[in-house]
Image (cartoon, helix red, strand yellow):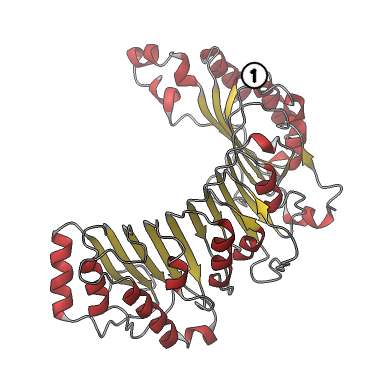
Amino acid sequence: MVLDFTQGAWAASRVCRSWRSASRHPHLWTNFRITSGCTGGGSFSHRRPTFIRYKNPIAILQTALRYSESCKLDWHVEIRFDDCIGNRRRIHSLLDVLMSHSERWACVSLTIPSELGKYLERVRGKVPELRRLTFVGCDPESSWEAWEPDDAPLIRAFAIAPKLRRVSVENALLLLTYSRLTSFTAKFNLYFPDVIPPLFVIKHCVRLRYMEANIVGRINHHHFEVDTTKPSVLNTSLKHLTINDPALLAYLSLPALLSLDIGDIGRLSCLSFITPFLDISQCSLTRLYFRDSAFSGAPLADILSLVPGLTDLGIGFHTDSDAIARQLGRIDLVLAELIKSLLVVDGKQHRLVPRLKHFDFMSRIYWADCQFVGPALVNMLHSRKRTMLRASFRWAAPRVVRFPNLSHACFVALHKMKEKGLDITICALDHVGGSVL
């Protein structure tokens, strides 16, 4: 097992005698990492572990905990599934040391197999100061197939944590007191038997303010079937929602929502879900970011008319479908209509998003001739010069993207606006990230 000696008090204590003396302050020994020696990789690393770099890591850990005295602890443990083979006794001994100080845990980050999560259940009811928890299960995917929803490993170690407010979980089943949470981030894997779906979390976390749900496996297969006969899940406290399956919006009513971010959605079109959601929720969005692959459904201007207080707007367009890529002419017209609808005429306050400050557009497909970037875009930005702070238009494509309507006069006008404080970017990138424009 490896303790990270490259940061904090570990490193400071090796500089000189004076620094060693100063580094003995208890608060400097409250933040540390313990890993199995793997570096790099992602949630599942196949690198060869470097075990037992120090002769007695448990004694070193006990020393660090003794230096921290009674201060609250912030620690991270990363133990891969393969690392447990032949080393369970030492790993259990290390966890025993940590669990003996569970009453001081404040922030905990765990990347461990579910069997170690079950081993931690000895601290249930003994984490009175725990405020933040990150739990990543690193069981091999082959074990998921053998689990049924009724016998999947449910980890109860953190079920009784009166101060726990922020949770992030991936590939694991945690029993929690959801009514107290204010922030919940989860990766819901279709192939993992998750018995706690995102709608359950939103419904039962009555104090929830931030929610991020990344659903893996549904987007390109069988995403949620919309059943309009089911009542909407109401949450009156949620303010920031990030999802990657827009069909979730069909089941939600979030009147307090301020920020909505719809991420990578595969081949789904999210516009048809946004409009009814805004009608039902009657929320006052200030930030709306979404990625779409077809721009079918309600016109963009109609959606913006429902969010007059919007200050941040982000639109992304990318797809791996050749059929949709051939519709670029139609999508160009859709964006041109949006630019036209955002134009402020004669200095009067426009009916659409008058407080708009940031406008970002991103495309990840080859766009030979981009028509909507031209005089109309320049005029729209100029008409909003009093409120607009940033406008960004980016393309990441394998070949050069051309802007036939972007004349020299447009460049001059954009340059003048940039000199007066507008953060304006029109950039096309090649496949290796090199700037073309």
Residue 404 visible at all: yes
Q: Is residue 49 left or right of residue 19?
A: right
Q: Name the quadrant containing residue 137.
A: top right
Residue drawn at (52%, 47%), measured in percent from left and top?
239
Question: Residue 143 at x, y = what percent?
Answer: 79, 53
**Is 62 drawn above or below residue 216 in the view shown?**
above
Q: On screen, 389 above or below 154?
A: below
The residue positioned 50% from the left and 58% from the top of the image is 261
Is 347 left, or right, of 118 in this rendering? Answer: left
Q: Nearer the viewer, residue 89 or 98?
A: 98
For the point 37% across and 75% down, the residue is 338
Is 248 in front, or is 60? 248
* Relative image position of residue 196 (x, y in whole percent): 73, 48
Side of 166 where 408 appears, left or right: left
State the residue at coordinates (63%, 56%). Answer: 252
* SS assignment at label 1: helix
Q: Which quadrant is home to the C terminus?
A: bottom left
The residue at which mark 1 appears reads as 103
Q: Position of residue 275 (x, y in %)?
A: 54, 67
- In the depicted view, which residue is nearer to us: 360 or 273? 273
Q: Quadrant of residue 2?
A: top right
- In the rendered image, the quadrant that contains the N terminus is top right
Kind of residue indicated by mark 1: Glu
